[in-house]
Amino acid sequence: MSTAARRVVAGEQVDSLLDALASGATEPASGAFAALAAASGAALVTAVARRTLRRLADDDPQTARLEEIAAEADAARPTLLASADRDAELQH
């Protein structure tokens, strides 16, 4: 992946933010990292729910709940990423 293609949070490349966090010199946007981790978790929840749904029959009793879980987790990601951006911007 090229440097230009990496995700940017508040104008900073994620790898630069990770370097700053790992340095221990400051607490750069730790809330941003928490929100980014939560957004990643939401993406994983969505992926697992969708993969499971592909394996289930349409009339399986778990189908409706898994669809809800996938939709809720998917809907949370933009909010979580916006929170990461806001927190990172506050640290600059």
Image: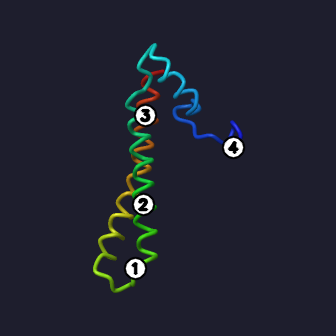
- The quarter holding residue 3 reads top right
Q: Where residue 11 sits in the image (x, y, percent)?
A: 57, 31
- The quadrant of the rendering that contains the N terminus is top right
Mark 4 — residue?
1
Q: Which residue is mark 1?
A: 56
Between 7 and 61, the one nearer to me in the picture:
61
Q: Amino acid at mark 4?
A: Met
Q: Which residue is mark 3?
A: 33
Work out how far the residue at label 3 is from the one at label 2, CA to CA, in angstroms. Answer: 20 Å
User: How many C-alpha atoms fall within 10 Å of the one at disc 4: few (<14), some, or many (≥20)?
Assistant: few
- Which residue is at a point 39% across and 84% down the rendered structure image? 57
Marker disc for residue 82: none
Q: State the residue at coordinates (46%, 13%).
A: 25
Q: Pointer 1: residues within 10 angstroms few (<14), some, or many (20+)?
A: few
SS at mark 2 in the image: helix
Q: Residue furthest top?
A: 25
User: Which is more N-terminal, label 1 or label 3?
Assistant: 3
Sequence-wise first label, 4 or 2: 4
- Determine whether the residue tagged by mark 4 lies in a helix, strand or loop: loop
